[in-house]
Image (cartoon, grey):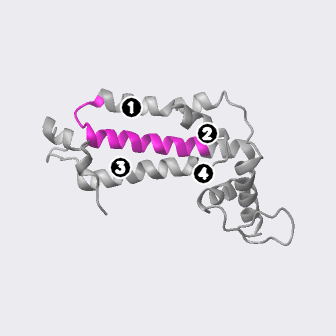
Amino acid sequence: VLGILLAAGLPHHVGTSGDQGEYLTLGHNLAAGHGFSLSTSPPYVPADFRMPGYPSLVALVDWLRLGSTGLIVMNCLLGAIAVLAIVRIARVVFPDHRLGIWSMGAVMAVYPTFVTYTNLAMTENLSIPALCWFVYLAYSRHFPLPIAPDGSSHCPSREQRSCLTAPRVWPSF
């Protein structure tokens, strides 16, 4: 909510030059049924220069005819999903510091990158939440939060908590 309020003060248009223009063109072509192409007129030559994830979301917004405002709202929602992942990571790493966990979430909600990227058509809007959720899933898989039968969290010892941030515990896949 904090990030969305701050983003409301940013310009309500998305740039159309450089990388942003290419992502918008790819999304528009996908929504119009022209395939994954950077061409703006026929023949629509397929492109393999960009990853299809974010342009697919741009295509959904374009297909729904939501315009720049819809794209900005989608980017805000992606930022909120990233903040939720950060809060979940903090909960795994520091389960006994409730105020710290929510403070981290509030700080990340107003983090300049999350806020300023909302009016940019860039893949970071999708890759940052994806990376945050990947980190959360990797850590929670290797260091699940112990849950008591009554549903409360057990606080790991100081040594157990510090081991979560030690270099030797990076998950191996």
Q: Quadrant of residue 9?
A: top right
Q: CA distance from mark 3 to mark 4?
A: 20 Å
Q: Which residue is mark 4?
A: 123
The mark nearer the N terminus, 1 or 2, is: 1
Q: Quadrant of residue 34?
A: bottom right
Q: Which residue is mark 3?
A: 136
Write the start and end of the magenta stretch as one range.
75-98
> Is residue 86 among what the camera can see?
yes
Residue at 50% across / 41% down in the picture?
Answer: 80
The three-letter code of the residue at mark 2 reads Tyr
In the rendered view, tell whether residue 47 sits above or below residue 2.
below
Circles 4 and 2 in contact, beta carbons < 8 Å: no
Mark 4 residue element: loop
How many residues crowd mark 2 within 10 Å: few (<14), some (14–19), many (20+)?
many
The three-letter code of the residue at mark 1 reads Met
Magenta stretch contains residue 80: yes
